[in-house]
Amino acid sequence: MPQPNHPKQPEKKNRVGSAMRMAAFWILIVILGLTALASFSTPAADAAEEKDLTEILAFARDEKLEEIIVRGNELIVTPREGTDLPRMISMKDPSSSLNEQGFASIIEDGQVRIRIEEPSSIWDNVFDIALILVPTILIIGFFVYMMRQAQSMNNQSMGFGKSKARLYGNDKKKITFKDVAGNEAAKQDLTEIVDFLKKPKKYEALGAKIPRGVLLAGDPGTGKTLMARAVAGEAGVPFFSISGSEFAEMFVGVGASRVRDLFNKAKKNSPSIIFIDEIDAVAHKRDARGGSGREDEQTLNQILVEMDGFDNETGVIVMAATNRVDMLDKALLRPGRFDRHVNVVLPERKDRLEILQLHFKGKPVDENVDLKALAAKTAGSSGADLANIANEAAITAAREGHKTISNADLTEAFERVAIGPERKSKVMTDEERKITAYHEAGHAVVGHVLPDSDPVHKVTIIPRGHTGGVTWFLPEEDRSYKNIYELKDVLARAMGGRMAEKIIFGDDGITTGASSDLKHVSQLAREMVTEEGMGGRTRNQVFNTSEVNFFGDRAKAYSEKTSEVIDTEIETLTRESTKRAELVLKVNQKYLDELAAALLEKETLEEKEVRDILKGTTLPPTAKLH
Ligand code: ADP
Ligand code: MG
Ligand code: ZN
């Protein structure tokens, strides 16, 4: 993204002793089921049709909805009268950024009444708590007792350990490497795995050890899950998938038995792939969380036991994905386990273009739609972000009544995904508009004048998301490195907003509008000093603050004295950037005034308009760094 300066269960029959005990057991399960029903469901959720969140959002935008009740991860949707839509429910998928964004936009647009309900409001009432809690505890206690009994009889307990793993076979659309844009290196690494799965004999004949575990590591939304499915699709083998977070919801002992079941199924269907998504949910460092989760530990141990039990003819490859390799238990990464690592990375510009092209395929777009330009300004976006932009663009076009998707729809979708929806309806007083105009103009002037800053791409005082206005800077190229001058210019231009307020309205005129700028400055300055060795006195020294020690605390690998030095260095960087911003603005105040005036009149200024207004600005020698 450009940097906006204002972001915001087995079928074995259980032979438990007597028939009496069996009956008691089932009765208990029924009671437990009823208790759960009584406490967690209300009539609203009954007879509702399950819908995709995207559909719900589209209905919301078309103003067809009356009310959305948010209960935990569930949305219960009541349509407006006369729309002949059914009642609907939908699950919010916590891993998808679209959902958050899209959802936030309904709230902001205020088209739908939103009611947040506690998943169980019953808890409000003490009597009710006792009424439910006491029997529940008794029942769960008995339940656990029964499970233990059943387990000690070397029996899997009545289907509860049955794996919920889904099998993606021929019924689902087959995904191959063609559906994954970019990430050539990762695909290359995985081609070998595909070959193992396709021709295991070839490798066996040569006595080659077939890999057992492949760990896909990368930022959220970079396409790890997609990539794992593509491997299965390429190899044409069954794909058994389960998510680490699903284990978290299970009863004692169930996680481990699910793992057993999952591996048994995969072995029966070999060659095959087992995919454990979000493995960090069960495989976090055992010590790092102070003994939490015996259950997780059992699940993890079972995974390790199963993998250790593979021999060269097993023909099952276990893939796992995580965004947090640093959080994983080391036992998982040992040879013979997840010893192959494949990094899935954020897409570069040409990969972003490919991803956009993939996701716009089949969508009607204007002839002059410029995906290249969009690819250029989305540096730092993940594949999921881009897919999200494509979807938002289609939704925007539909809402605006367009037949095809235009460049304006793209821009709106991009900004919506990056920051949030425009809030044209938000009422700003004249005074607030004026302050915002000067604030944004301040960012723009400082960014324009300083030589190592990215050019200003756009300035606007239309509120969007949680911001009053935005100044966008557009990096000209994707680059992996930034030098110290560029970073210092980033600090200074971020201070430009607050400094403009100060110059124009005085020390007492400064506002809370700069809080996210200030946060950005202090975070970046800290990173420069502690991680990049860019402190003045501490040049080339780094200070590790992210290592988690045995007790799960962040270990400080330096003394109190060093800590003070670090604080001083951060302060120096902050003060220097404040000073540079102020110098630039004072020398160019005439342009600051002109830009602010233009913003008040037009609200949004594009790159060229900004450049025209700021043509005559000068860089004061005292603000020069080199
Ligand atoms: P992760 O598992 O890394 O969080 P996902 O595989 O769930 O990411 O990606 C989410 C969605 O984003 C995918 O379903 C796909 O639509 C899109 N996406 C992500 N990366 C790519 C890519 N490289 N090529 C095409 N689409 C992608
Ligand atoms: Mg995923
Ligand atoms: Zn700002």
Image (spheres, rainbow, N blue to C red):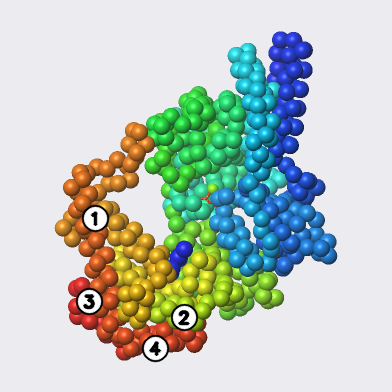
Is residue 409 rendered to the left or right of residue 205? right
Nearer the viewer's eye, disc 2 or disc 1? 2
> Quick one: label 3 or label 1, which is nearer the N terminus?
1
> Quick one: label 1 or label 4, which is nearer the N terminus?
1
Q: Which mark is residue 623?
A: 3
Identify residue type, mark 2.
Glu
Circle 2: element type: helix
Residue 200: image x %, image y %? 53, 34
Identify residue type, mark 1.
Asp
Is residue 137 rendered to the left or right of residue 484? right
Locate residue 486: give its quadrant. Answer: bottom left
Give the residue at mark 1. 567
Task: Residue at 46%, 55% (x, y): give it.
Answer: 183
Circle 4: element type: helix
Distance from the alpha carbon under mark 1 to that under mark 4: 38 Å
Q: Which mark is residue 594?
A: 4
Residue 392: image x %, image y %? 60, 66
Nearer the viewer's eye, disc 3 or disc 1? 1
Nearer the viewer's eye, disc 3 or disc 4? 4
